[in-house]
Image: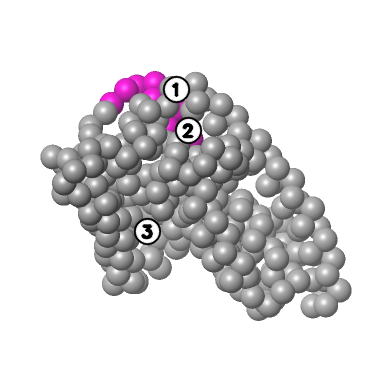
């Protein structure tokens, strides 16, 4: 356990040396959130009091809460794995007792933890800027379900990024694939707009996929537009997806490793 904490602390130190880059990302995130809010304020205008069950205050709260939760789970693990495979650094883990899976996850947690904390603080600051408009709701049961949901969403996101990174066994570049998946994920998570603005079939698909549980559903639970039982069912869906992704990773890793050993060792 100590060696994993060492890896995490090393990447914290590295993050502190690139403070300007971290700050630039945070400014961009805050700007994107503000643009979304201004866009919806313009859509509501002066006459429309409600759109698909959302008042303008609820829509602003939805955006702020959703982005706050989403800030906790994002990572760039796929690009790190892609580079390790392409540059041959994966070879040293094949002969060492420390598994690559454990190493790369602890590395990524250490690498993103600083930016995640700063991102959460930035999102919190934006929320405070809209304190008079933001709808403040606190319920212990809902808070517990939302917290577990965000943790499971974080694990799901790590596993998905890990899986995409492993595609580098067969191709030279995974950035384009990850960018495509990221846009699909944002669409089905409700990051562009609430999913209930879409036809029912898309909503049903999104509920079967893991993406909605990182933005739309926790935001809806916060607003209490969904009963807590919806959240509990969502936790079950997330657990199923974590097992599915882990199983797929094991299969892809074993097959990819054979190709890697055949080409590079």
User: Sequence-wise, which precedes: disc 2 or disc 3?
Assistant: 3
Gap in Å between the C-alphas at discs 3 and 1? Answer: 30 Å
Q: Position of residue 180 (x, y in %)?
A: 57, 64
In the image, taking residue 155 as reference, residue 129 lies left or right, namely left
Q: Position of residue 15 (x, y in %)?
A: 38, 65
Q: Can residue 58 be seen in this view?
A: no
Residue at image location 29% in from the left, 42% down from the top: 59
Quarter of the image for residue 119 reads bottom left
Q: What element carries label 3?
A: helix
Mark 1–mark 2 contact, CB under 8 Å?
Answer: no
Image vertical order of residue 16 relative to residue 2, above or below: below
In the image, taking residue 44 as reference, residue 194 lies left or right, namely right
Image vertical order of residue 211 relative to residue 256, above or below: above
Q: Front-most of 216 and 240? A: 216
**Label 1 neighbour load within 10 Å: few <14, some 14-19, many 20+:** some
Say which residue label 3 marks.
115
User: Which of the labelled discs sits on residue 148, or is there none?
Assistant: 2
Image vertical order of residue 188 relative to residue 151, above or below: below
The span picked out in magenta is 138-151
Residue at image location 42% in from the left, 36% down from the top: 218
In the image, taking residue 230 as reference, residue 54 lies left or right, namely left
**Label 2 neighbour load within 10 Å: few <14, some 14-19, many 20+:** some
Residue at image location 26% in from the left, 44% down from the top: 60
Say which residue label 1 marks.
228
Q: Can residue 264 be seen in this view?
A: yes
Task: Tell me if residue 122 is in the magenta stretch.
Answer: no
Q: What element carries label 2?
A: helix
Q: Is mark 1 on a helix, strand or loop?
A: helix
Camera-nearest label, 3 or 1: 1
Which corner quadrant holds the C terminus? bottom right
């Amino acid at each position: 356990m100590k060696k994993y904490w060492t890896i995490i602390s090393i990447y914290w130190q590295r993050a502190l040396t690139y403070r300007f880059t971290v700050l630039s990302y945070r400014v961009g995130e805050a700007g994107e959130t503000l643009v979304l809010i201004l866009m919806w304020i313009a859509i509501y205008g002066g006459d429309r009091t409600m759109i698909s069950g959302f008042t303008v205050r609820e829509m602003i709260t939805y955006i702020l809460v959703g982005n706050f939760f989403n800030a906790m789970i994002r990572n760039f693990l796929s690009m790190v794995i892609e580079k390790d495979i392409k540059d041959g650094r994966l070879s040293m883990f094949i002969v060492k007792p420390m598994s690559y899976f454990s190493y790369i996850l602890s590395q990524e947690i250490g690498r993103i933890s600083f930016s995640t904390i700063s991102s959460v603080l930035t999102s919190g600051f934006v929320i405070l800027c809209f304190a008079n408009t933001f709808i403040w709701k606190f319920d212990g049961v809902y808070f517990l379900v939302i917290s577990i949901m965000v943790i499971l969403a974080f694990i799901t996101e790590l596993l998905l990024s890990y899986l995409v990174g492993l595609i580098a066994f067969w191709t030279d570049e995974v950035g384009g694939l990850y960018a495509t998946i990221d846009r699909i994920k944002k669409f089905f998570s409700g990051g562009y707009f609430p999913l209930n603005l879409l036809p029912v079939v898309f909503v049903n698909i999104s509920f079967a996929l893991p993406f909605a549980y990182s933005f739309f559903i926790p935001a809806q639970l916060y607003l209490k537009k969904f009963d807590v039982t919806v959240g509990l069912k969502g936790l079950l869906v997330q657990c199923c997806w974590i097992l599915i992704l882990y199983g797929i990773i094991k299969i892809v890793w074993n097959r990819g490793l054979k190709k890697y050993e055949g080409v590079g060792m």
